[in-house]
Image: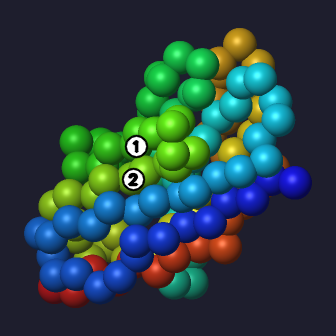
Amino acid sequence: QVQLVESGGGSVQAGGSLRLACTFSGLTYSSYCMGWFRQPPGKEREAVAAIADSTNNTDYATSVKGRFTIYKDNAKNTLYLQMNSLRPEDTAVYYCATHPAYVGVCGWFVGEFNYWGQGTQVTVSS
């Protein structure tokens, strides 16, 4: 049974930093993709960043490129999202998610990910 548990959310002023963590377990497929998504108030869930397990290739939404970094610590079974230079528009519930990745290709859309964490709130004040 795949389980994903996010932590590290909170409130921060604009320009500040937060690091989100997603501890995962139960991944039995040989190759997988992990991603961070967010859902701002009243808006749809959107992809923020993704990383392919087999290649460590990463992808970022244009709005966070250069400010956010996705990485994994396989020894700790943990996915991270380092968020710097936070802006009020980054306020959202952040989710981690995963799906089996064939030949190391990551999905990007909500429907491509089949396991999700419960989410953690990030609030950035101006």
Q: Which residue is mark 1?
A: 70
Which image quarter: residue 1? bottom right
Quote the CA–CA distance across marks 2 and 1: 5 Å
Residue visible at 41% across and 62% down? 20
Q: Is residue 40 left or right of residue 104?
A: left
Q: Residues within 10 Å of mark 1 (few under 14, many from 20)?
A: many
Q: Could you tell me how many numbered marks the image carries? A: 2
In this view, 78 is above or below 55: below
Looking at the picture, how far across and down is residue 100, in whole percent? 78, 33
The reply to whether the C-beta atoms of the residues labelled 2 and 1 are less than 8 Å apart is yes
In this rendering, the answer to whether 39 lies above or below 68 is below
Query: Which residue is rendered at x = 65% and y = 21% of the image?
Result: 105
The residue identified by callout 2 is 81
Q: In the rendered view of the protein, which quadrant contains the C terminus?
A: bottom left
- Is label 2 in a helix, a strand or a loop? strand
Q: Residue at x 53, y 36 (%)?
A: 74
**Looking at the picture, does residue 110 appear above or below residue 7?**
above
Looking at this rendering, what residue extends furthest in the front direction?
A: 75
Amino acid under disc 2:
Leu
Left or right of residue 15, residue 125 in this image: right
Mark sitting earlier along the chain (2/1)? 1
**Crowd class of label 2 (few under 14; some 14 to 19; many from 20; radius 10 Å):** many
Residue 37 in sight from this viewpoint: no
Q: Going 16% across and 61% down the picture, which residue do you hit?
A: 85
Callout 1: SS: strand
- Residue 33: x and y in percent read 64, 34
User: Residue 16: percent from the left, percent from the top?
Assistant: 15, 70
